[in-house]
Image: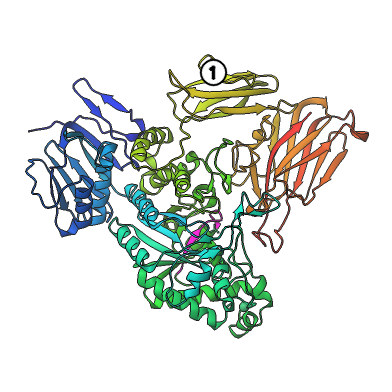
Amino acid sequence: MSFKKIAVLFVFISFLSSCKTEEYVTEIPQIIPIPSSLVVNQGFFLIDKTINITYDETFAISGDFLRKFLKQDTNIESTSSSTIQFIFDDTIENDEGYQLEIQPFKIIISAKTDRGAFYAVQTLRQLLPPEFETGSFSEEKQRIQCMTITDAPQFKYRGMHLDVSRHMFSADFIKKYIDALAMLKMNTFHWHLTEDQGWRIEIKKYPKLQEIAAYRNETLIGHYSDQPHQFDGEQYGGFYTQEEVKDIVAYAQSRHITIIPEIEMPGHAQAAIAAYPNLGCTGEQVNVATKWGVFEHIYCSKDETFDFLEDVLDEVTSLFPSEYIHIGGDEAPKTNWKTCEQCQNRIKTEGLKDEHELQNYFITRIEKYLNSKGKQIIGWDEILEGGLAPNATVMSWRGTNGAVAAAKQKHNVIMTPTSHCYFDYYQSTNPDEPLAFGGFLPLEKVYSFNPIPEELSTEESKYILGAQGNIWTEYIPTEDQVEYMAFPRILAMSEVVWSKNENKDYSNFVKRVEHFNKRLDVLDINYANHLYEIEGELISEENKNYYKLSTTLEDKTIYYTLDGSPVNLFSHVYTEPIPITESTKIKAAVFNTEKRLGNVFSETINYHKAVGKKITINKTPHKSYTGSGPEGLINGISGSDSRYGDKEWLGFWGEDIEIVIDLGEEIEINSIETRFYNGKGQWIYAPKNIIAYYDDGSSSKINFSTSDDIIIKASLVTHTGLREGLKTRYIKLKVENYGTIPDGKQGAGQKAWTFIDEIIIN
Ligand code: ACM
Ligand code: ZN
């Protein structure tokens, strides 16, 4: 049988969901993460469970995985004339690369390692109907389009993290999570095992870690920002036994997933200190934490603590074959170290400058110990403070500065900045979303992530090993909700770390996500579906304002109303931007011919005197929080009350800013109101003060209170007193940043953020 290539090299970016030529109808594969290159050929391979699969020991894991996936009985010899053959090919450059050649009677998987072959199998898996996932496919043979895929990852480190301390999940769920990573060609699971709120790994030498540190008396209800704090009064906890850990590690190995365990130090240690108070500086009996945040009870730097940690690490390293152990290092307030005799002694005897250098001493001493056992350490980017331990890999989470500093010092880096990698943030502005930490990280923003910081040279960027998504679980109590927060953002992350930049295209990606969702349904994975949601934007042209609607998936029909009435199939069909001349309440939704597909989009445009006028700011917002530019401050739309990262809020880190609004002509103004986000747990503070200046040289000023309200409003000009009848064309607003975050607060010693939106002028 011969087969003729269709003379088209498919460039993925221009993919349609099917492609007709005069002679054939070819099925275009929809693979996530998108492969490096794919050429579709004529013909089909027919597959069923009797297929003949041949592989030797080199490909034991991937071959076995495929047989199991096809529900083959390993005792029965195949009688099929079609084969799937695994071939060793050391001309393939990348250890994790592969070629997948699908011919009418033969599939050839070529790779240099079992890992490469495993990823070929994951690709093949996505070419089969989702029903194969559960074995519920019919006995009939299935067709797979003939094609050649040549593929390899862009990054060596492709990870997902899961915090099992704030909330704990079953061993079976951990395996399901690992399965999902493997399906998406990720290779690392970062297992965050210890925290203030619970110690989750059995350590045989220290039974109180199981008896005391693994349980908290109760848990905070609602969001940390909801005051006063309320608790559920129910004990919560548990731990993974060493037997369970071994079983999970073996399970991960059989999917080419490395598990990196994290044992936090010197901070986030309150649970351990509750079990063994001597590990802290004060010896005080404390409880396992029952609310979220950063706690001052951290490990003391006395020898006794190191003895404990070395014992713990002995047991941990015997369970995890990973080259890396994550030792935490983040968010360790130095309050207790400052007044602890033993810590101050340590500073003296070791000739250290201050408590930051003591943290470096702490981490370096642990690194030395782990290096002596053949292990390397990873730490959060705080391990840069006071100097880096000599061989440490840095996990950069507070933006990318840590990554840049570490790479320039020739240290390896894993990228996980909050702005693009924190999957505990909201993924939609829809008010029906489940309670989350805060922030806003929609699918598109994850997808847009480039793990290489632009400040790095080509040489320096070699130190960027890859990236990972993080799932912190303060507000994620159930397994269903872990999946909801992970999916579909993990799909975007898989493409960020695996696929070539030139193959990435968001509108093509979301079509593949829509297709992939059917596989998630079959796998019983709970995912967020915001594909049918609508985005809105105020645009201004030639002094006129319009409202533009768009959907994530381009081929859908939007219906809308402008009077606040419910939207249905009898509402207006959206064809072009809607003129806006007054305050308007827009409702819109995507419908197919029968029913609504996504949530109803609702936006209130609060029309005021500055809408669509000119605005300039003397500083550019932080690159992670640029909103929709300065114009967004006067577009009639106020930033969300709970998601400071939405496209309205502009974020500035530690900077004073000056904003100038040009109203076009001198007009009378009666009031100016500005809104600031005030999320102290997230290092966001209302400014110290704000001053407005007018054409006549007069000004007005507001100092801010220390209110805990999430949104702080400032009214600058009111109808009262002298300001009545004020006329001006220009308004200059000086906004003075809060400054340094005080001791005892989260982010103490860091610069505070200012988040602003909207400036309402009437
Ligand atoms: C972190 O989010 N504290 C690493
Ligand atoms: Zn101490």
Residue drawn at the location 48% of the way across and 39% of the way down: 444
Q: In the rendered image of this protein, does residue 606 appear above or below residue 594?
A: below
Q: In the rendered image of this protein, does residue 406 appear above or below residue 481?
A: below
> Image check: 32 left or right of 238?
left
In the rendering, at what x and y percent does residue 587 appear?
A: 59, 24
> Image check: 178 left or right of 742?
left
In the rendering, at what x and y percent does residue 352 appear?
A: 61, 79
Task: Indicate which quadrant contains ligand 2.
Answer: bottom right
Magenta region includes residue 400:
yes
In the rendering, at what x and y percent does residue 455 appear?
A: 51, 53
Q: Outermost residue toward the right?
A: 722
Residue drawn at the location 69% of the way across and 45% of the way down: 710
Residue drawn at the location 64% of the way across and 70% of the way down: 334
Q: Amino acid at mark 1?
A: Glu
Quadrant in which residue 100 is drawn: top left
Magenta range: 392-401
Along the line of sight, the residue nearer the viewer: 507 or 489? 489
Along the line of sight, the residue nearer the viewer: 197 or 295? 197
Is residue 195 visible in the rendered structure shown here? no
- Reading the image, the residue beneath label 1 is 576
Ligand 1 within 8 Å of disc 1? The answer is: no
In the rendering, at what x and y percent does residue 30 appear?
A: 31, 35
Magenta region includes residue 145:
no
Say which element carries label 1: loop
Residue count near mark 1 (Cα–Cα under 10 Å), binned few <14, some 14–19, many ≥20: few
Is residue 178 visible in the rendered structure shown here? yes
Quadrant (top left, top right, bottom left, bottom right) of the C terminus = top right
Q: In the rendered image of this protein, does residue 78 appear above or below residue 610?
A: below
